[in-house]
Image: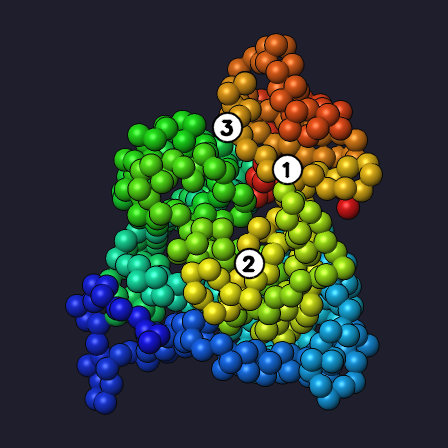
Amino acid sequence: MIGFQLNDSLSLDAFSTNPFSILDQLCQDDLATCLSLHLLENGDRLPRENWQIAQIKNLLAYAKAHSSFWNNRIPDCSSLSEVFQQIPILSRDDLNLQVSNEGPLSKAFLGDEISPYQSTGSTGIPVKIFTTKNNSRYNSLRSLAQYLIENRSFALNRTFIKPADGPHLYENDVGIKIESYESWNGALNTLFKSGSYKIIHFLDDVDALIGELKKQKVGYLACPDSIFSILVKNGGKELISSLNIHMWLHHSDNLSDSSRMLMKEIGIPIRSNYSAAEVGLIAFECEEMPGCYHVAHSNVYVEENSNDVIKVFNKELKRLIVTQLHSFVTPIIRYELGDYGCLHNSCPCGHDGPTLSDIYGRKKNFIKCSDGNLIPFTFYSKPINDIVDFDEIFCYQPRVDQLVIELGSKKQIMSRQMDELVSYINRVTQNQFDIVVKCVTKIDWTRNPKKLPFISYID
């Protein structure tokens, strides 16, 4: 049977004092939505697939009726299965063209407020789309629903460390900025006790970051591996063990084996998700099968492009295509994110629904060779830190025959260390590239605001 255990601590004023009412309306609406999401994504498969078909039909009909761009792309056909596969795959350039020419498809879709959103472009071409308040509400409630699905407590603190991307942080050379909130579970706060919520915008002040984390129990730690590695480098296992981390919610980059092993030794669980700025949540990592991701059926429909296949470690990976089911004001239909992966009919844990594994981002994880082949390149800082001491690092591919490594360090780097570094990179990249090492006092992250450790700029 599908259901929440709901063994979390209730607030003292959890229940409404109004006649014929148990919960405050906002709380009741959010709780009902979380339960609906759980039923949809983890209940019987056939009803879920029927719901998805209906949502896709709604989206196609709306896009065709309100957009000349989509009217030209969506064929006239009564059968969804026939028409859907005939729709051309949508690229980032296509998406930007539609938004540039047509803007939002409605000034107020179903009375909902519309706002623009633009991605950072850190992994390729920046994308501008329009979203609604309902899109934002879905994103928030789907995140909260996962805690209920996994029976995780809202009473713990939540700490979100994100790379600083506000221009004022760079202009004023502020190394860290803090946002603090009393709770993090929205309207459910009236029902369930909530821990505090802290957002740390981190630029480069490691001491300030560690000091801020030590002020109170971290609880749920949300951050990319690149930032977690900085904490490990500056405090080791002892620091991580002392911060009262209940779970690490990893996101945005690749999870290194060393980080996973360290957390396993300490006994702290890790959970990753797969998402994209344009479409939101795509999949959550399985509790029981690390590396397997249950598709967020309530938000997206995922396909594979069988015409775009690469081999990584003797596994065939296909380009992933995503349809955002609620993207009415900026339709995102059969959209090519640029990522590769394996799409399975179900998960080994028993979850009866599409599941992803072996997800690789084209811009994040692959070096493009002169012969057109791609080399998976998961760039971790620890092996390099064993060769040379640095404060920060960024590797990028500006040309098909060259890799550039920027080392940010206030210490002098010896020529012997530089030679060892070049030798190491040559080994892992099969001696195919000219390796350029640049030593700077501080890396300029304005072109890579997410601080991804590696980006290929080759299309």
Q: Earlier in the sequence, mark 1 or mark 3?
A: 1
Residue 90, picture quadrant: bottom right
* Residue under label 3: 382
Q: Nearer the viewer, mark 1 or mark 2?
A: 2
Identify residue for label 1: 377
Q: Secondary structure at mark 1?
A: loop
Which is more toward the observer, 47 or 234? 47
Q: Looking at numbered disc 2 in the image, what kind of residue is underneath it?
A: Leu
Disc on the earlier residue, 2 or 3: 2
Q: Nearer the viewer, mark 2 or mark 3?
A: 2
Amino acid at the residue labelled 1: Phe
Residue 38, picture quadrant: bottom left
Residue displayed at 64% across by 73% down: 329
The residue sitting at the left extreme is 12
Colour scheme: rainbow
Asked if residue 116 can be seen in this view, the reply is no
What residue is rendered at 64% in x and 28% in y? 428
C-alpha distance separating marks 1 and 3: 14 Å
Callout 3: SS: helix
Residue at which label 2 appears: 356
Which of 122/344 is in front?
A: 344
The CA distance from mark 1 to mark 2 is: 20 Å
The one nearer the camera, 282 or 213, is 282
Instruction: Estimate the x, y position of residue 6 in percent, counting from the top left.
Output: 26, 68
User: Label 3 amino acid?
Assistant: Lys
138 vs 287, left or right, is: right
Q: Secondary structure at mark 2?
A: strand
How packed mark 2 is, by other alpha carbons closer than 10 Å (few <14, some 14-19, many 20 or more), is many
Q: Say whether residue 52 is left or right of residue 154.
A: right
Horizontal and vertical percent position of residue 98: 76, 67
Cα distance between the residues tagged 2 and 3:
28 Å
